[in-house]
Image: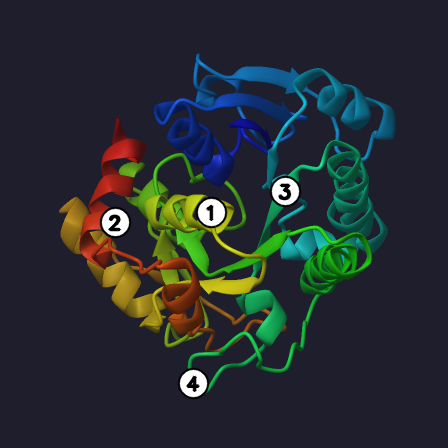
Amino acid sequence: MRAIVTGGAGFIGSHVVEALVARGDEVLVLDDLSSGRRENVSSAAELVAGDIRDDVAVREVFARHRPEACLHFAAQADVRVSVARPDFDCEVNVLGTVRLLEAAREHRARVVFASTGGALYGECREPAPETAARSPLAPYGASKLAAEEYLATYNRLHGTAHTSLRLGNVYGPRQDPHGEAGVVAIFLGKLANDEPPRVFGDGTQERDYVFVADVVAATLAALERPAGVFNVGTGTATSVLYLLDTCLRVSGVQAEPVFEPPRLGELQRSVLDPSLAEQELGFRAQTPFEDGIAATWESIRA
C-alpha cells in the first residue's frame, strides 16, 4: 500500500517505516525534524520536511502521495513542555491531528494514531482496560485524548475506520538517551557515559514497558483489522528499581544511583490491560524484557 508516516524520522515512527518498506509498501515520511533525524529514515522511503500544523504542507503531501493509510506518530510528547506551553501542545497534538484527518478524508486514507496509555488513565491499581476512566494529569494526556475523540467523531460522522493505539512506556533502539523522556534510554545513556543514573523518588514507581518492535507489530496489525481503541502494552508492572537493576546487569556496568526528590504529579503505578488488542488485533507483546534492554544497550553504546 501507499502510506504516509508522520514523525517517521523519530524513535517509534522510523521503526514503523522500516517495517512497511520491508513488506514492499510505498512510504512517505512527513517530519519537521525537530527531534527526528534524517539518518533514521530508510533510504527506500521518501522524506518530506514539514509540520503537521501546516495545512498547505499536509494537503500537498497527501495530494502527491495519495496514501491509503496514514500512521500518525508526530507529536509533542514531553509532559513538562505540555505543562509549560499547553497552547503549543494543543496545536501539535490536536490541531495537527485534525489537519491530517481532513487530508486523509479527502483521499479516503485510514489513520492509525499513536496515543498514550499512562497519561490518560492516571493511577492504575490493576491493569487498565480501554473502558477505564480517563483522568489525564497533564495537558499532554488531555491533548492525546482530544485527538482520540476527533478520530472517533470522524468515524461516526464520515464512516471512516480510524484506530487509536494507547501505547505503554515504549523503549528500544533510537530512543534519545539525552532527552527528558524515556527512562530506559536515559539510564543506559548514563551507564554508557560512566555517569550515575538518577532515580526520582524511591524507585518503587511502576510502568508498563513495551519494546518498540512490539509496538510496530501492533501498528501493522491495526491496519488490517476493524477500527477501535486498543492498549498496546505487556500488562506487566515493572518498577524503576527493577528496571535499573536490569540495565546494570545487562550492561555489566557498576554504578550507584543518585536518588532525588519525586517529581510533582508523577504517577506511582501505570500498567495497561492488553487483552482487547490480543482478542481483536491478534497482538501480544513478544519481546522478553531483558532481551529488549539488551538490544537497547547495544544500540546506545554502538
How far, Cα to Cα, is label 2 from label 3? 33 Å
Q: Amino acid at mark 2?
A: Ile
Give the crowd class for mark 2: few <14, some 14-19, many >=20 residues within 10 Å.
many
Give the Cα distance between marks 1 and 3: 10 Å
Q: What's the distance in space between the residues labelled 1 and 4, CA to CA?
A: 30 Å
Instruction: Residue at 59% x, 41% y: name it.
Output: 73
Instruction: Residue under label 3, please give it.
Output: 110
Which residue is the site of mark 2? Answer: 293
Q: Is residue 255 visible?
A: no
Q: Amino acid at mark 1?
A: Glu
**Residue for badge 1:** 224
Q: Say which of marks 2 and 1 sits in front.
A: 1
Q: Is residue 193 above or below residue 187?
A: above
Q: Nearer the viewer, mark 3 or mark 4?
A: 3
The mark lying in front, picked from 1 and 4, is: 1
Query: Quadrant of the image for the C terminus?
Result: top left
Picture coordinates of residue 111 (x, y %)? Answer: 63, 44
Disc nearer the start of the sequence (2/3): 3
- Foreground disc of the pair 2, 3: 3
Q: x and y percent of residue 286 in the render?
A: 25, 55
Q: Position of residue 150 (x, y in %)?
A: 77, 57
The kind of secondary structure element at disc 1 is helix
**Kind of residue indicated by mark 4:** Glu
| Disc 2/disc 1 C-alpha distance (Å) | 29 Å
Residue 87 visible in the snapshot = yes
> Which residue is at the far front?
159
Residue underneath mark 4: 126
Q: Secondary structure at mark 3?
A: strand
Q: Find the distance from the CA under tag 3 to the CA under tag 4.
A: 32 Å
- The mark nearer the N terminus, 1 or 4, is 4
